[in-house]
Image (tube, rainbow, N blue to C red):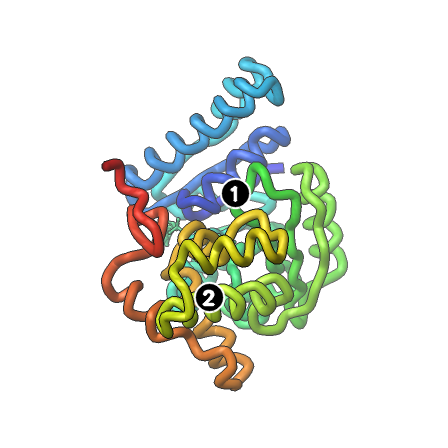
Amino acid sequence: MKFGVIGAGQMGAGIAQVAAVAGFDVVLRDVEQRFIDRGMAGIEKSLEKFVEKDKLGADAKTVALARIQTTTSLEAFADCDLVVEAILEDQSIKTALFTELGRIVKTTGILASNTSSIPITALATASGRPAQFIGMHFMNPVPLMTLVEVIRGHLTSDATTNLILETAAKMGKTAIQCNDFPGFVSNRILMPMLNEAIQCVMEGVATPEAIDQIMKLGMNHPMGPLTLADFIGLDTCLAIMEVLHHGLGDDKYRPSPLLRKMVQAGLLGKKSGRGFYNYEKQ
Ligand SMILES: NC(=O)c1ccc[n+]([C@@H]2O[C@H](COP(=O)([O-])OP(=O)(O)OC[C@H]3O[C@@H](n4cnc5c(N)ncnc54)[C@H](O)[C@@H]3O)[C@@H](O)[C@H]2O)c1
């Protein structure tokens, strides 16, 4: 099976890596060569860690890297059997991409989105092949997290769903199905908690460090909510809260004004070097 991945950011690079290790031929695209280079460097570094921990042979690393073909062109996806999109969380940009992919990818090809919250059914309509469209929501970091949330659009066929369940299993993941509602299951439940933690910072309830420690030690969470928000990317968190707010029409999903302000200031978390914590090398 030929496996396409669009977007070589934190998620796309991880998906390409896991697909290549699972034995698929992968085509990975980003809009500029420098983003591809950054993504490939991340993949190489991550594979090296698996080698160091004896979880992957050095040969298997070389073979996996050789299976990833990179491109800045969309035409390279024409003969893909499955294309997973992992570009930024913006409905109009994803819609335009899927309209083009629907024209380019062979008619038997399946299209999937790794979106955290954007309606699968709307993207499926834009693609012009709603029966062969599905949500394939990997978790971050993809090489380590076992869950794939599989979201069926309103018209997704059983054949498409079955192929995605099989593919996820071949990638060593556990796929769990849900239906297409704003935020699906994972982010409908997770994101309001992160947003509330940000609201607590804004209101001076406690420092970010104290909030994270209270949730780690008190709730047995592996990571505090503000550390997790930084890790996901504050721009992605804001985009998801906007989808929940608009999609469910309830003000309980209102994005925290502090979250909005931090995104406006370019404080996006780990990927920009600063969010609730500072990641810049001192
Ligand atoms: N960050 C997370 O924890 C997480 C978890 C699950 C799902 N997601 C979802 O995955 C998607 C990607 O998130 P991310 O964290 O990897 O973002 P990111 O900002 O790290 O990467 C996005 C990449 O997409 C590229 N891009 C933008 N437009 C493109 C196009 N038209 N064609 C090809 N590449 C394009 C950008 O250059 C960038 O490299 C989003 O939909 C996000 O909601 C994120």
> Callout 1: 10 Å neighbours few (<14), some, many (20+)?
some
**Disc 2 secondary structure class:** helix
Q: Which residue is mark 1?
A: 141
* Circles 1 and 2 in contact, beta carbons < 8 Å: no
Q: Examine the image and state in which quarter residue 215 appears.
A: bottom right
The residue at 50%/18% (across/down) is: 62
Return the mark for residue 197.
2
Instruction: Give percent across and percent down for residue 74.
Output: 40, 48
Left or right side of 31 for 80: right
The residue at 60%/18% (across/down) is: 54
Q: Is mark 1 within 8 Å of ligand 1?
A: no
> What type is the residue that disc 2 sits on?
Ala
Left or right side of 33 for 99: right
The residue at 42%/47% (across/down) is: 7
Q: Examine the image and state in which quarter residue 152 appears.
A: bottom right
* Residue 124 shows up from this direction: yes
Left or right side of 229 for 131: right
> What type is the residue that disc 1 sits on?
Pro
Query: Which corner quadrant holds the N terminus?
Result: top right
> Is label 1 or label 2 in front?
2
* Residue 96 shows up from this direction: no
> Callout 2: 10 Å neighbours few (<14), some, many (20+)?
many
